[in-house]
Image: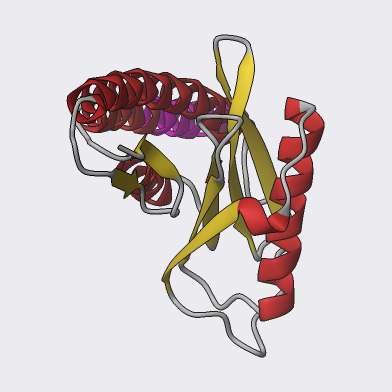
Amino acid sequence: TVETALEEIALRRENEKLLAEAERRLAAMKGMIEVFVGASALATYGDVVDAVTAFVEQVVPLDVSATLVRAEPSRPATLTLRLRGAIADADLQRLNDEILERYRALAGIPLSDADVLVRLSGKGPEANGRPLASRLFVPLMSEGRVTGVLAVAAHDANAFSQDEERMLDVLGSRTAEVIHGLRVKIEAERRRMNSMVEGMADGLIMTDASGEVVVDNAA
């Protein structure tokens, strides 16, 4: 009958939709694995963030991504903002403030604006940019401690699906693991360098990109 034929067409379309969604998820997971295999060999937190956010932009319909990383509580944090759409200065500042507030609430420790190094890439802010109607925040957790916040935002309302939320949760967990592994390597390198300079006759001070002293030998 016509009714049966219409039901079969609707069922076939639904199956095709489900198959396409499953293939998209599989491709996203495969891409995620490749990203983190490469990210584990990177030398800086900034490089890790750039690799992760470049992947996020491929699989999530966003207009701006943001990643706050504070691998060591006693040191400054880095906030990386990557703009793809036309974002107004006021909206970008509001997103910045929301990310810092999320981190402070989740981590339970203070973080002043002065202790945040901001990296901006992609498009520049625009005076007449559209407002950001959708936001999604994912904490970066390592060994029970909050090491940062991953955020995405979009102009469209309800821009992010439940599947995308779940994928970002997985992405956040894996990002935190890579950051923790890099922190362990950096701390080991600092100890090695400290051992090298302790016996030097001349004074030596070395700093990282944020200006923080990492090796200090007053001699």
Q: Nearer the viewer, residue 75 or 30?
A: 75
Rendered-image quadrant of the C terminus: top left
Find residue 123 and report its horizontal and vertical position in percent. 44, 76
Task: Note whether 171 is above or below 87 in the view shown.
Answer: above
Residue found at x 22% / y 35%: 42
Find residue 67 and report its horizontal and vertical position in percent. 53, 46
Task: Note whether 219 is above or below 193 in the view shown.
Answer: below
Q: What's the image's color scheme?
A: secondary structure
**Can I make out residue 157 in this image?**
no
Rendered-image quadrant of the N terminus: top right
Task: Magenta stretch: give its range.
Answer: 7-22
Residue 26 falls left or right of residue 201: right
Q: Nearer the viewer, residue 95 or 191?
A: 191
Q: Write down the quadrant of residue 113 in the picture.
A: bottom right
Residue 173 falls left or right of residue 129: left
**Can I make out residue 200 in this image?**
yes
Residue found at x 72% / y 70%: 91
Q: Write down the quadrant of residue 185 in the picture.
A: top left
Total marks placed: 0
Residue 10 falls left or right of residue 187: right
Helix, strand or loop for the magenta stretch, by majority: helix
Find residue 183 and report its horizontal and vertical position in percent. 38, 24
Tell which residue pokes out farthest to the bottom in this image.
Answer: 127
Magenta includes 59?
A: no
Tell which residue pokes out farthest to the top in this image.
Answer: 143
Task: Note whether 92 is above or below 24 in the view shown.
Answer: below
Find residue 102 and report its horizontal and vertical position in percent. 76, 40
Q: Nearer the viewer, residue 100 or 133?
A: 100
